[in-house]
Amino acid sequence: MDYKKFLAKRKAIRQHRRMWRWIYRQTLKRKRKVTREEYFSKNKIEEKVFNNCYCCEFAFGTDCSACRACPLNWGSYAETKKCVDKFERNDHKGLLAKWNSTVNWRNAAKLAKQIATLPERDL
Protein backbone atom coordinates (compact mmCIF):
# COMPACT_ATOMS: atom_id res chain seq x y z
CA MET A 1 0.00 0.00 0.00
CA ASP A 2 1.39 3.38 -0.93
CA TYR A 3 1.93 6.01 1.74
CA LYS A 4 -0.87 8.30 0.54
CA LYS A 5 -3.37 5.42 0.65
CA PHE A 6 -2.08 4.43 4.09
CA LEU A 7 -2.68 7.97 5.41
CA ALA A 8 -6.17 8.05 3.87
CA LYS A 9 -6.96 4.72 5.53
CA ARG A 10 -5.71 5.97 8.92
CA LYS A 11 -7.79 9.15 8.61
CA ALA A 12 -10.95 7.24 7.61
CA ILE A 13 -10.62 4.88 10.57
CA ARG A 14 -9.89 7.74 12.98
CA GLN A 15 -12.94 9.68 11.77
CA HIS A 16 -15.09 6.52 11.88
CA ARG A 17 -14.09 5.81 15.48
CA ARG A 18 -14.57 9.44 16.53
CA MET A 19 -18.10 9.51 15.06
CA TRP A 20 -19.23 6.20 16.56
CA ARG A 21 -17.75 6.98 19.98
CA TRP A 22 -19.68 10.27 19.93
CA ILE A 23 -22.87 8.45 18.93
CA TYR A 24 -22.30 5.93 21.73
CA ARG A 25 -21.73 8.62 24.38
CA GLN A 26 -24.58 10.85 23.23
CA THR A 27 -27.00 7.93 23.09
CA LEU A 28 -26.21 7.08 26.70
CA LYS A 29 -26.37 10.72 27.76
CA ARG A 30 -29.69 11.49 26.03
CA LYS A 31 -31.24 8.08 26.65
CA ARG A 32 -32.35 7.87 23.03
CA LYS A 33 -30.80 6.67 19.81
CA VAL A 34 -28.59 9.38 18.34
CA THR A 35 -27.98 9.26 14.57
CA ARG A 36 -25.05 9.81 12.27
CA GLU A 37 -26.89 12.78 10.77
CA GLU A 38 -26.97 14.35 14.24
CA TYR A 39 -23.20 13.84 14.50
CA PHE A 40 -22.63 15.69 11.22
CA SER A 41 -25.03 18.47 12.17
CA LYS A 42 -23.78 18.96 15.74
CA ASN A 43 -20.15 18.99 14.60
CA LYS A 44 -20.92 21.32 11.66
CA ILE A 45 -19.64 18.83 9.09
CA GLU A 46 -21.08 20.04 5.82
CA GLU A 47 -19.12 17.91 3.37
CA LYS A 48 -21.13 14.94 2.13
CA VAL A 49 -19.67 11.64 3.31
CA PHE A 50 -20.62 8.64 1.18
CA ASN A 51 -23.25 6.53 3.01
CA ASN A 52 -22.58 8.73 6.06
CA CYS A 53 -19.57 6.48 6.62
CA TYR A 54 -15.93 7.52 6.51
CA CYS A 55 -14.84 3.97 5.73
CA CYS A 56 -17.22 3.79 2.74
CA GLU A 57 -15.82 7.13 1.61
CA PHE A 58 -12.29 5.71 1.78
CA ALA A 59 -13.25 2.40 0.14
CA PHE A 60 -15.13 3.93 -2.78
CA GLY A 61 -12.26 6.32 -3.41
CA THR A 62 -9.81 3.42 -3.39
CA ASP A 63 -11.30 0.50 -5.26
CA CYS A 64 -14.05 -0.15 -7.76
CA SER A 65 -15.14 -3.18 -5.69
CA ALA A 66 -15.53 -0.80 -2.79
CA CYS A 67 -16.85 -3.01 -0.01
CA ARG A 68 -13.82 -5.24 -0.39
CA ALA A 69 -11.66 -2.18 0.33
CA CYS A 70 -13.35 -1.38 3.65
CA PRO A 71 -10.54 -0.91 6.16
CA LEU A 72 -12.50 -2.53 9.02
CA ASN A 73 -13.22 -6.14 9.87
CA TRP A 74 -16.98 -6.34 10.38
CA GLY A 75 -16.88 -10.05 11.23
CA SER A 76 -18.86 -10.93 8.12
CA TYR A 77 -18.50 -13.64 5.52
CA ALA A 78 -20.37 -11.61 2.90
CA GLU A 79 -18.46 -10.50 -0.19
CA THR A 80 -19.96 -7.01 -0.15
CA LYS A 81 -21.86 -4.86 2.33
CA LYS A 82 -20.16 -6.57 5.26
CA CYS A 83 -21.47 -3.87 7.58
CA VAL A 84 -25.10 -4.75 6.89
CA ASP A 85 -24.98 -8.48 6.19
CA LYS A 86 -23.18 -10.97 8.41
CA PHE A 87 -24.00 -13.82 5.99
CA GLU A 88 -24.34 -16.51 8.62
CA ARG A 89 -27.11 -19.02 9.10
CA ASN A 90 -30.01 -17.52 11.07
CA ASP A 91 -28.21 -14.17 11.43
CA HIS A 92 -28.36 -12.08 8.28
CA LYS A 93 -27.81 -8.70 9.85
CA GLY A 94 -24.41 -7.16 10.28
CA LEU A 95 -23.68 -4.66 13.06
CA LEU A 96 -24.71 -1.60 11.08
CA ALA A 97 -27.98 -3.21 9.96
CA LYS A 98 -28.72 -4.12 13.57
CA TRP A 99 -27.95 -0.55 14.67
CA ASN A 100 -30.11 0.87 11.86
CA SER A 101 -33.10 -1.27 12.83
CA THR A 102 -32.99 -1.01 16.62
CA VAL A 103 -35.27 1.43 18.38
CA ASN A 104 -34.03 0.58 21.89
CA TRP A 105 -31.49 3.22 22.92
CA ARG A 106 -29.54 0.81 25.12
CA ASN A 107 -29.10 -1.61 22.23
CA ALA A 108 -28.20 1.29 19.95
CA ALA A 109 -25.48 2.41 22.39
CA LYS A 110 -24.09 -1.12 22.70
CA LEU A 111 -23.96 -1.54 18.91
CA ALA A 112 -22.43 1.93 18.41
CA LYS A 113 -19.65 1.02 20.85
CA GLN A 114 -19.00 -2.24 18.97
CA ILE A 115 -18.91 -0.39 15.65
CA ALA A 116 -16.50 2.20 17.08
CA THR A 117 -14.04 -0.48 18.16
CA LEU A 118 -14.06 -2.77 15.12
CA PRO A 119 -10.60 -4.16 14.33
CA GLU A 120 -8.70 -3.01 11.26
CA ARG A 121 -8.20 -5.17 8.20
CA ASP A 122 -5.02 -5.51 6.22
CA LEU A 123 -5.61 -4.22 2.71
Image: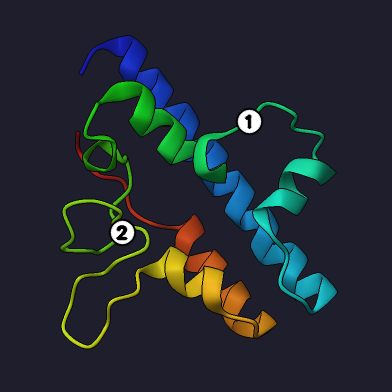
Label 1 – label 2 distance at C-alpha: 23 Å
**Coordinates of residue 79 in the picture (x, y in percent):** 16, 53
Res. 74 mark: 2
Which image quarter is the C terminus in?
Answer: top left
- In this rendering, position of residue 76 left or right of residue 27: left
Query: What type is the residue that disc 2 sits on?
Result: Trp
Res. 69 mark: none
Residue found 63% across the figure and 30% down from its top? 48
- In this rendering, position of residue 82 left or right of residue 34: left
Residue found 22% across the figure and 88% down from its top? 90
The residue tagged 1 is: 48
The structure's colour scheme is rainbow
Residue found 60% across the figure and 75% down from its top? 108
N-terminal of the pair, mark 1 or mark 2, is: 1
The answer to whether residue 95 is above or below residue 63 is below
Helix, strand or loop under label 2: loop
**10 Å crowding of disc 2: few (<14), some (14-19), many (20+):** many
Query: What type is the residue that disc 1 sits on?
Result: Lys
